[in-house]
Image: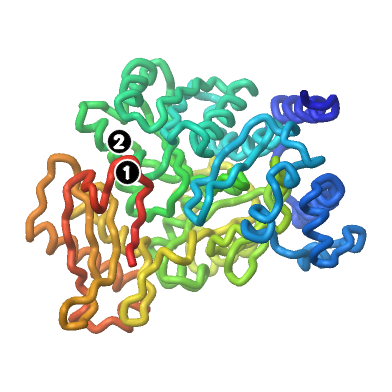
Amino acid sequence: MQSDSDQAAISGALQHFCTSDLDALIQPAPDAGVDEVLALFRRTAATVPAYREFLAVHGIQPETVTGLADFSRLPLMTKPAYMQAFPLAQRCENGILTSCDRVAVSSGSTGQPTFWPRSLRHELDIAVRFEQVFRDSFRAHERRTLAVVCFALGNWVGGLFTTSCCWHLSVKGYPLMVATPGNNKDEIFRIIRALAPEFDQTVLLGYPPFVKDVIDAGLAEGIDWAAYRVRMVFAGEVFSEEWRAELVRRAGSDSPCHDTASLYGTADGGVLGNETPYTIAARRFLAGHPQAARELFGESRLPTLVQFDPRSRYFEVHDNTLVVSGESGVPLVRYHIADQGGVIGFGQMQNFLRDHGAKGWIDEALGIETVVRPLPLVFVFGRADFTVSFYGANIYPENVSVGLEQPEVTGWLTGKFVLEVREDTGGDKGLRVTAELRPGIEGDAAKAGELANSIRAQLIRLNSEFSHYTPTERQTPTVILRPFGDAEYFPVGVKHRYTRR
């Protein structure tokens, strides 16, 4: 049984969330997050047995940490040195699991699956990110909304966490109904046909490739997505602005900045940040100006770009990778996520866009009624090990994906591909892209050649290393077209990997 103090904390958090306007829940300030992250440290050091021992091993007395400079010198939490070194209960408040009431499991892509407990009060903090998307982007406080959760259900974090956060919005008073078909297309279409006509808008929430599959399969079955005023929420993968524009077009929308949003989330930290109309407009501008993007982000690929609330999730950068602190069932204090990325202040971003002539373009894309909150931004490339090296150039899947999303080829492709460097019998290396065809489409040499030229053109445009390092005669990749659901390269129901080595 939960203690009286735990119950009081949960009740207080729920009341605060339900009775507070979004403007009150998000109050950006120049030093926002500093007091909160120091309080998180003190609370964790006082109540979490594993963290006390972790500090002792590193010779740190908690009382000596009095300011942000001291905090920034604390040892990084990592999975091997902390999460896997201490028992799960010892990583929770007071060393007991019953302070939490639900659990998620990480995918285990870097080893054994890891369990991440949490309680309702931790979930409400994340629900603010969903409210920001549903209110600021979709105007869901004014529109009857059907939210269709297309993430896989079960212990994996995406489906049930998303469902819970959407339920919290309904409890708060949003005219929102939540349907949970998971990643079952037949169930999704059954819900759409039966319920979507009763609502002002329908929101599909899922992994980007699966949402695209749903839109395409629905069109093939005669579903008129435009009639249901579809909006989309994504998580889990970086995608290009060409991909977003094409998907929005297929869904019958003409407003990518307001009808889509991507979440930056992890099983361990929940939703850490979210796209806003402002960040989408900025990213769309940068997609058309690759030199400016490289100047800002330092690489020849476009990362996910989101805003975050430092009072909820406090970001730092360590060797070009992200470190985050935030409250959860297992409190995170300088937790090394190891995603490549960086942090940009809101004023810094505004100045950069102004200096590169983007202000007028973005103002027109957003319109005068769009809420722009002066929150800091974090950009995320993902893990560093998803690139391939070719003639000394780092080739990113994000560069290749743009080639698959050009108008002349996208109609017969799903968007999934595998990037490889292959060596022939003569010892010469070549770039190879294996792409998945849409259901019912057959590949031929003409299609393969057209796709190869499209990929080459985008690699040259977006990746200066590729254009300068790779000999001209080696710049056109070999393209292999495989049928939909190919067992070797595109097995159904398995999380897709875009590179092979």
* Dot 2: element: helix
Please say if 131 is above or below 442: above
Q: Which residue is mark 1?
A: 247
Compare marks 1 and 2 and give the one earlier in the sequence.
Answer: 2
Relative depth, front residue between 40 and 96: 96
Amino acid type, callout 1? Leu
Image: 164 above or below 489: above
Asked whether the residues under the numbered discs 1 and 2 touch, taking CB atoms below 8 Å apart as contact, a structural biologist would say: yes
The structure residue drawn at horizontal position 48% and vertical position 66%, both measured from the top left corner, is 384
Residue 210, above or below 192 = below
User: Does residue 276 appear in the picture of this structure?
Assistant: no
The picture places residue 355, in percent across and down from the top left corner, at 54, 69
Mark 2 is on which residue type?
Ile
Packing grade of label 2 (10 A; few <14, some 14-19, many >=20) is many
Q: Secondary structure at mark 1?
A: helix
Residue with the mark numbered 2: 215
Which mark is drawn over residue 48?
none
| The C terminus: image quadrant | bottom left
